[in-house]
Image (cartoon, rainbow, N blue to C red):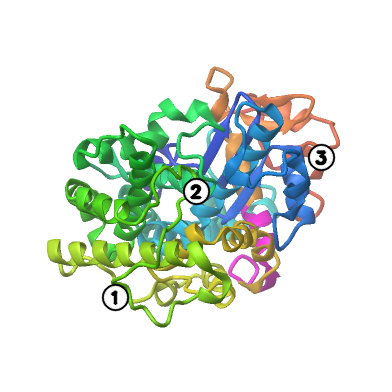
Amino acid sequence: MVKTHLQNILTKKKKIKALYLNSSKDNIDGYFKFETFDINFNHDYLRYSLEKSKESLSFFENKNESGKEYFEIDFSDKHQKNFAEMHQVLAHESFHLLQSITFPVIFRYIEWNRKVNMHKWYLFNIVIQEGFKFKRYETIINERSILFAGYDDKIITEIEYCLDDLDIGLSALQSESHDLSMINLIESSALTYQLVITKDFKCESIPDLKNDELYNKAFQRFIEESKIEIDSDQELINSRIIFLLISNLIFNCDEDKYEKIIPMFIGLSKIAYKYNDTLNSYWEKDKFASPKFSSEPSYNTRNNVVGHKSLDGANLYYYILLCDLVDEIIIDINNINSYFFEETPAGNLLSDEKTKVIYRYLESNFDDFGSPYFLPLLIANYNFHQRFSVSFNKIKELDFTSPYKNTVMTTHTDTFVVNNLLKIEEILSLDETDTNVGNWFECCKKHGRVNTIETVINCKEEDSFNQYFQVGDNLKLADIIDLES
């Protein structure tokens, strides 16, 4: 039974490895890994800069030779375009962090995944110490390894329950309705966030993404359903903002109602024209890429604006408007389905210790985190966004009690452990007949991505996974993988 569960889940899992943004033309990409809350970038300058800057993005300031504000970048200038692209990749991945720690449909999958990985860790350490070797195409949890470890029915049943939960989580994330998938909404909203934050509403810094269905399908569907005619820059700005607010709110639904997320998106899109009217009533005309208000909003009397100390002038009015627009959308959601929203705060729904410590850190360091008004604050306050976008550097340093060793360790060490397990399974799955480079293994700088186990295990390059990998009593990859099978 365990074997059947694994076959089904691993087949599905190939579809969701990470949430990412890629620009192959300029070789700048980043990804957010579900299993570990890990954000990585393959661009050396960006990665180095982020490691040196824990609290801000000030390291970019000297890179903009024009002296302009970021959102006024000249995209025809290669230097400024690269500068903008790095900001956008960072914004994109940091938004995935926000989604994954506050959206029940995502963080439940993450927590179930971590339970399965805990069982992998225990099983892996038991069998390799006794001389067990994994065969090609096997996973760590497999029929042979379980029998070798001598697991009783109770442990096997517990593993099966965990695999069932993971299957439910994967099904939720991969569910489709109205010719849209959850991943379409997740990626489209992350792309829209990076464009709204950087005021690159026309997607000029990474033009390759304009026609990428993964990133644009949900937004294009929103335009079709809303009937908003993007015949001006202002209408494009409005559409991006409205789409972002809607897609963020609908994922905060009760976790048992995930199948209603896409229908709710369609329903709100059909009435989005009124949100467009609300925005048009406030924008100062002909201020593309720098929305401002000509006067203070007349009907808003919000007295206790969270985060107002970091806002002033036009940005404060911008924030208040976005909050009011959020309120308007929430009213419409409740009119459509009064039981749609999850009433319990996301932080109180979390069960995994790593997930909880990350949430509590963000909650204690960022105003309004976990509320519907957190996104408006990010949009209206670029400095606030900057600080949030590099928060994962601090997240790596948090201490918590890890289930993998049942001891206190940093989130970064925990990530290292899980990544090693995942990499071993990636190596075992390598198939030299597979021509899809995306499914190959990153060996080292010299060999790059490869599709044979032999290349990985025999690699002597200092920067290779094979050289730094070591477990148990100095066991190397060649000691735990059977190449003869």
Residue that label 1 marks: 343
Residue 154 among those drawn in magenta:
no
Q: Which residues are magenta?
A: 402-418
Tell me the distance, in whole angstroms, between the alpha carbons under discs 3 and 2.
50 Å
Question: Label 3 neighbourhood size at 10 Å, few (<14), some (14-19), many (20+)?
Answer: some
Q: Quadrant of residue 326?
A: bottom left
User: Going by the image, does 293 lie left or right of 53?
Assistant: left
- Dot 2 or dot 1: first in sequence order is 2
Image depth: mark 2 or mark 1 in front: 2
Residue that label 2 marks: 290
Tell me the distance, in whole angstroms, between the alpha carbons under discs 2 and 1.
35 Å
Q: Where in the figure is residue 264, as x and y percent of width and height?
A: 20, 53
Q: Quadrant of residue 118?
A: bottom right
- Dot 3 or dot 2: first in sequence order is 2
At label 1, which amino acid type do we have? Glu
Q: Is residue 281 visible?
A: yes
Residue that label 3 marks: 467
Q: Residue at x 61, y 54 (%)?
A: 418
Question: Label 2 neighbourhood size at 10 Å, few (<14), some (14-19), many (20+)?
Answer: few
Which structural element holds mark 2? loop
